Amino acid sequence: MPIEERTARLTVLIDPRKKEVFERLCAEEDMTPSQVVRRLIREYIERRTGVPWKPPPPEPRARHDSRSSARRQRE
């Protein structure tokens, strides 16, 4: 699965005991809590929409001119 851009923050308040158990279970899967939450959100979207999640294609990047970059480094 392609890596998505991570640009938005979601703050969730939960019971400290649930957080502790959640973090321990995530560690047992060798996953971060953020990875698990992203997976849960993706699965929720797919279940609710009935469509597999497909992130939009990445924005085209400006071409990098190595000559001007090298010139800037010398200056």
Image (cartoon, helix red, strand yellow):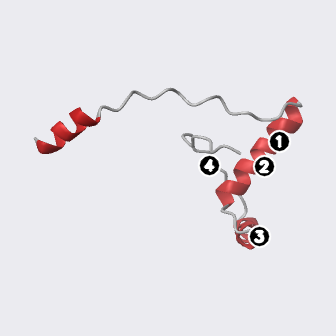
Q: What element carries label 1?
A: helix
Instruction: Of the two numbered discs 1 and 3 on the same chain, state the one appearing first in sequence.
Output: 3
Q: Distance between the residues labelled 3 and 2?
A: 14 Å
Residue drawn 75% across the image and 73% down it: 28
Query: Can you say whether 60 is above or below 23 in the image?
Result: above
Q: What residue type is labelled 3?
A: Leu
**What residue would you read off at disc 3?**
25
Sequence-wise, the earlier of marks 4 and 3 is: 4
Return the x and y of residue 4 as percentages of the image width and height: 62, 41
Q: Which numbered circle lies on residue 40?
A: 2
The residue that label 1 is drawn on is 44
Residue 32: x percent and y percent?
66, 62
Q: Which of 42 and 18 is in front in this view?
A: 42
User: Label 2 to label 4, Cα distance in Å?
Assistant: 15 Å
The quarter holding residue 46 reads top right
Q: Earlier in the sequence, mark 4 or mark 1?
A: 4
Query: CB under 8 Å between callouts 3 and 2?
Result: no
Q: Which of marks 2 and 4 is nearer the N terminus?
A: 4
